[in-house]
Image (cartoon, helix red, strand yellow):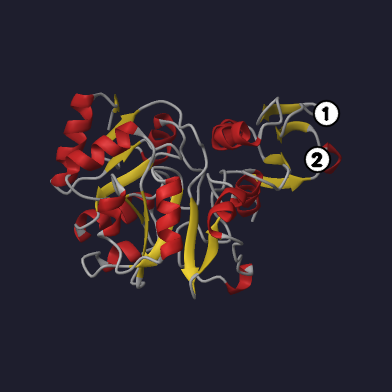
């Protein structure tokens, strides 16, 4: 499958493919998604097949606006409505009791569904022209690095998608933050493109489940996930790394002193938002030929640093 620019004409072709039961890779502000008609179980099954994704891992459903999203839920608590008004369109996913119309394959048989409204014009146009919500996990092989460019999609999925829409590099660069509610209280299921601090300013303190108590109730919940094709090791500073011709180094803001085959810097300004946007691009670059290990420097754990560290910790298992 060739990559095509996300022009109005190509978006219309992609929407027609989805309405026919096809599978399309498309850009969002977070990462590229692999989408199918959320109400077509057979089409959604192709997503799992192309990604080699286990069927017990639920999908995120993308809507073009809050009205479409609300039709996918059975009930919505008031704090969730506040989050919708504040952060949609944007990198926030809500996990709430599902409407009966949502197929079980989308939710992995769970009684809840994960939904968001993306903040990307091509994604919104695609959903509108498809005339319904689109189920779309990240457009990568299961467990591997998420794609932030169309070429990343092609590299991993080859001819799997019917169409790959290209709209350049994604702006946020990490997946959405996922929130659910238990007893009316907000719960963080996955750190992501909206900082925890921003969400807490809207709905109050978030409950963060212990890792060993968290069931797979949302996408991206596996212990090992978002991983490069080579070993990744987290280090506090370069002192924990071993330079060499087969080693690569992922720095936060300053290059290491040692000699490595390849070095990438997330943000020379030390900006966590820029670092998040560059994370997967840098990791894709570092997993290249001849590399056996990537040493990844820890970043500050506040703001979007929490999402970056979540991805790096999962990648090292």
Under tag 1, what secondary structure?
Answer: loop
Query: Where, by quadrant of the figure, is residue 241 drawn?
Result: top right
Q: Quadrant of the C terminus?
A: bottom right
Q: Residues within 10 Å of mark 2 (few under 14, many from 20)?
A: many
Q: Residue at image x 37%, y 35%?
A: 120
Q: Residue at image x 13%, y 46%?
A: 20
291 versus 55 height, above or below? above
Position of 266 with respect to 68 (left or right) is right
1 versus 316 height, above or below? above
Residue 239 horizontal/vertical position (percent): 86, 40
Q: Which mark is residue 258?
A: 1
Q: Which mark is residue 241?
A: 2
77 versus 18 height, above or below? below
Q: Nearer the viewer, residue 219 or 233?
A: 219
Q: Residue at image x 36%, y 65%?
A: 76
Residue 176 horizontal/vertical position (percent): 48, 48
Q: Which mark is residue 271?
A: none
Q: Are marks 1 and 2 in contact (CB under 8 Å)?
A: yes
The residues bearing labels 1 and 2 have C-alpha atoms spaced at a distance of 9 Å
Residue 13 horizontal/vertical position (percent): 17, 32
Comes first in the chain, label 1 or label 2? 2
Q: Nearer the viewer, residue 136 or 204?
A: 204
């Amino acid at each position: 499958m060739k990559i095509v620019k996300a022009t109005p004409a190509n978006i219309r072709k992609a929407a027609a493919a989805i309405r026919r039961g096809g599978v399309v890779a498309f850009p969002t502000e977070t990462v590229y998604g692999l989408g199918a008609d959320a109400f077509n179980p057979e089409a959604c099954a192709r997503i799992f097949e192309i990604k080699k994704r286990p069927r017990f891992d639920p999908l995120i459903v993308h809507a073009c606006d809050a009205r479409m999203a609300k039709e996918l839920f059975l009930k919505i608590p008031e704090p969730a409505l506040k989050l919708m008004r504040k952060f949609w369109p944007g990198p926030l996913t809500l996990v709430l009791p599902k409407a009966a119309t949502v197929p079980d394959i989308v939710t992995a048989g769970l009684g809840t569904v994960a939904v968001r409204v993306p903040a990307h014009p091509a994604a919104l146009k695609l959903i509108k022209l498809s005339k319904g919500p689109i189920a779309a996990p990240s457009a990568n092989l299961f467990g591997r690095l998420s794609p932030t460019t169309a070429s990343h999609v092609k590299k991993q999925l080859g001819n799997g998608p019917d169409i790959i829409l290209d709209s350049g590099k994604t702006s946020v660069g990490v997946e959405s933050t996922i929130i659910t509610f238990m007893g009316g209280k907000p719960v963080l299921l996955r750190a992501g493109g909206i900082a925890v601090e921003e969400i807490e300013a809207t709905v109050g303190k978030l409950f963060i489940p212990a890792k060993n108590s968290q069931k797979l109730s949302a996408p991206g919940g596996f212990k090992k996930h978002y991983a490069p094709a080579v070993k990744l090791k987290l280090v506090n500073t370069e002192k924990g790394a071993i330079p060499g011709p087969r080693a690569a180094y992922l720095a936060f803001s300053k290059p290491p002193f040692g000699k490595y085959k390849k070095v990438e810097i997330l943000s020379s300004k030390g900006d966590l938002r820029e670092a998040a946007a560059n994370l997967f691009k840098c990791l894709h670059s570092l997993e290249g030929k001849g590399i056996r290990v990537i040493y990844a420097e820890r970043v500050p754990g506040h703001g979007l640093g929490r999402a970056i560290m979540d991805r790096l910790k999962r990648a090292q298992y």
